[in-house]
Amino acid sequence: MTPENQAKMDARVRAIAALLHADAKAEGMPMATLGQLEQTVRQQLQTHVSPGIGNFLSKQIAQNPATHLGA
């Protein structure tokens, strides 16, 4: 990954983290210990982030199936 793209991704990751943190606080999700924080982050990623990434990648494959054969 280019340094420019890494910087863009880092900025977006920080923005997503801030949104997820605010949501976790508003929902009263546990974050008092490292274990609770890990569980909360995992739950939020599975609920909010992974589906969006999966949908995006699925659409990419559907639009260009020949480029993904054998991948």
Image (spheres, rainbow, N blue to C red):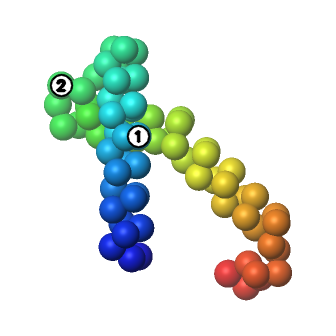
Residue lying furthest front in this view? Answer: 4
What residue is rendered at 46% in x and 41% in y?
A: 45
How many angstroms separate mark 2 from mark 1 (CA)?
A: 20 Å
Q: Which of 17 and 45 is in front in this view?
A: 17
Residue 46 horizontal/vertical position (percent): 51, 41
Image quadrant holding the C terminus, namely bottom right
Residue denoted by label 1: 16
Residue density around tag 2, few if under 14, some if 14–19, many if 20 or more, within 10 Å: few
Residue denoted by label 2: 32
* Residue 58: quarter of image: bottom right
Residue density around tag 1, few if under 14, some if 14–19, many if 20 or more, within 10 Å: some
- In the picture, measured across the screen, residue 4 lies left or right of residue 53, that is left
Q: Are marks 2 and 1 in contact (CB under 8 Å)?
A: no
Tell me, yes or no, if residue 20 can be seen here.
yes
> Judging from the image, what secondary structure is the residue with disc 1 in?
helix
Instruction: Give the residue type that dot 2 points to.
Output: Ala
Instruction: Give the residue type that dot 1 points to.
Output: Ile
Q: Earlier in the sequence, mark 2 or mark 1?
A: 1
What residue is rendered at 68% in x and 51% in y?
A: 55
